[in-house]
Image (tube, grey):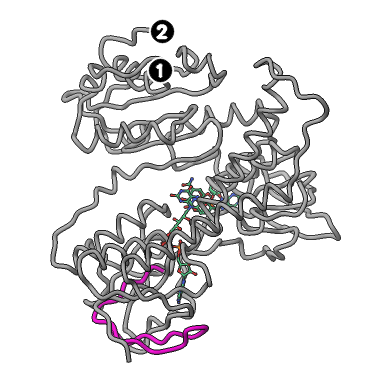
Amino acid sequence: MSKYDVAVIGSGPGGYVAAIRCAQLGMKTAIIEKYSTLGGTCLNVGCIPSKALLDSSHHYEDAVKHFEEHGIDIPGEVKVNLKQMIARKQTVVDTTTGGIDFLMKKNKIDVYEGVGSFIDATHIKVTGKDATEIEAANTIIATGSKPSSLPFINIDKERIITSTEALKLKEIPKHLIVIGGGVIGLELGQVYKRLGAEVSIVEYMDRIIPTMDKALSKELNKVFKKAKFKMNMSHKVKSVERVGDEVVVKADNKKGEEVEFRGDYCLVSVGRRPYTDGLNVEAAGVKLTDRGQVETNAHLQTNVSNIYAIGDVVKGAMLAHKASEEGVLVAETIAGQKPHIDYNLIPGVVYTWPEVAAVGKTEEELKDTGIAYKVGSFPMRALGRSRASMDIDGFVKILADEKTDEILGVHMIGARAADMIAEAVVAMEYRASAEDIARMSHAHPTFTEAIKEAALAVGDGALHV
Ligand code: FAD
Ligand code: NAD
């Protein structure tokens, strides 16, 4: 039987990063993945393919709506070739997952293809292509998550679909009904809206992206409405039925009236659930929470001292970079180091256009905790850079401590916000004040000038409004 210092179960951005860090620290490492490709949800059916389709559909929309204004005439009609678009997305996925194979080899990590299940706290059975049993002094559970649904919905994967199917549709929906105005619903809703579908967002809460700062929800809602999405807030979905090639969704609106939506596809994007099916945690004595997450302490250690868990299968935001940070933390903990993660500084991004990005506390959280704060914000439309590319929607908002001026939260919506948020993360990691950012030179013309101007607005006032 092969023996390892560490076995990692699951090869998503949590698991594969943990394995690399373990190997870098000199530990003999194995990774077990039930699918034939490495990379987990993120690389195969999550972050990467969704961004590939967002990019393709953005190009199409630009060609149809904006090229003429830029002085670019296209003879003939611009058409979507969905088959090619999906094929390109798959090439991107294949190249990316292939890169993980390379990294495993480079770091001398043994890869087992098959389902990993505990025999006991130090032995794991692999069932599938590389069927075997291995012994591991330490195990990292990184089994991720799966789409969740509502009890009355039958996901048939043809017309009533999750994000996984939405990434490989064979036709552009005529009317896509999206249940859940969270990250997946908005990103994939925007893909198909750009390609010509009518898109109805049906959200239970009174605003989209309800966990983010309210001002971001409001601005994104405005942009989506302008783009002719049908936005239905405060709607409680109560039935989803397939009738032939049609899907009928019934919901109660704010007034308690029944509203019916009829479309040809329905995307169910109401969150994801931690995934431990087939893992046989009971055999190792590992406890799960009531919500099905693997229970861990601050070191991501389970109640069984040599078994750790990371990523979507444990508490916290279901984000790839959060999973990876946790993978590094656990590897270093096993190696005897004392690593730390500041969860407050894990940024959240929605890759719609305009992009939405945030780090730190929202204004609502500061109000709830009674922390006195100052606000500075700056509209993207006031930037020369925004006008040059006609990306004028959005703003940057900075929240700083009333007394010390320390930055407590940064919330932005606008072109390239996904990349710009890194500046806020660095600033907050070094506990910068708003004045620190206001005094730093930001290249002109760039979108990042909105961050400097918002920081100035926290103090004496922005220069360009
Ligand atoms: P996963 O990536 O889910 O990987 C878990 C792996 O474990 C899987 O490969 C699974 O097959 C394997 N596994 C499970 N059980 C076993 C077992 N018993 N034996 C062997 N293998 C097993 N996050 C972002 O930060 N940015 C984004 O842009 C983003 N976009 C997303 C878009 C979509 C459509 C979706 C669905 C998710 C997106 N996410 C995004 C979320 C991100 O994908 C997850 O947070 C991330 O993948 C979690 O990583 P993980 O390693 O914890 O788990
Ligand atoms: P989510 O939690 O982001 O959004 C789910 C939405 O569904 C919420 O707005 C919620 O209020 C709504 N909802 C819940 N029950 C409902 C009901 N009965 N009727 C109507 N609406 C209902 O979840 P998601 O969009 O499914 O994404 C799952 C996870 O994947 C998220 O945790 C997210 O972090 C991750 N993800 C991240 C990215 C990214 O980082 N860009 C992209 C996609 C997915």
Q: Is residue 150 magenta?
A: no
Q: Nearer the viewer, residue 170 or 272?
A: 170
Q: Which stretch is magenta?
A: 121-142
Q: Are marks 2 and 1 in contact (CB under 8 Å)?
A: yes
Vertical order, 219 against 105 (above or below): above
Disc marking residue 465: 2
Residue sitting at 77 percent across and 32 percent down?
A: 78
Query: With 116 as the anchor, is 83 left or right in this view?
Result: right
Q: Position of residue 357 (x, y in %)?
A: 43, 36
Residue pictured at 37% horizontal, 18% vertical: 449
Whole-percent x, y for residue 394 in the image: 49, 23
Numbered disc 2: secondary structure? loop
Quarter-of-image position of residue 334: bottom left
Question: Residue type at mark 2?
Answer: Val
Image spot of residue 361 (x, y percent) = 32, 37
Which residue reaches farthest bottom? 1
Distance (Cα) linking label 2 and label 1: 8 Å
Q: Which mark is residue 378?
A: 1
Q: Main secondary structure of the magenta part?
A: strand
| Horizontal side, residue 305 vs residue 222: left or right | left
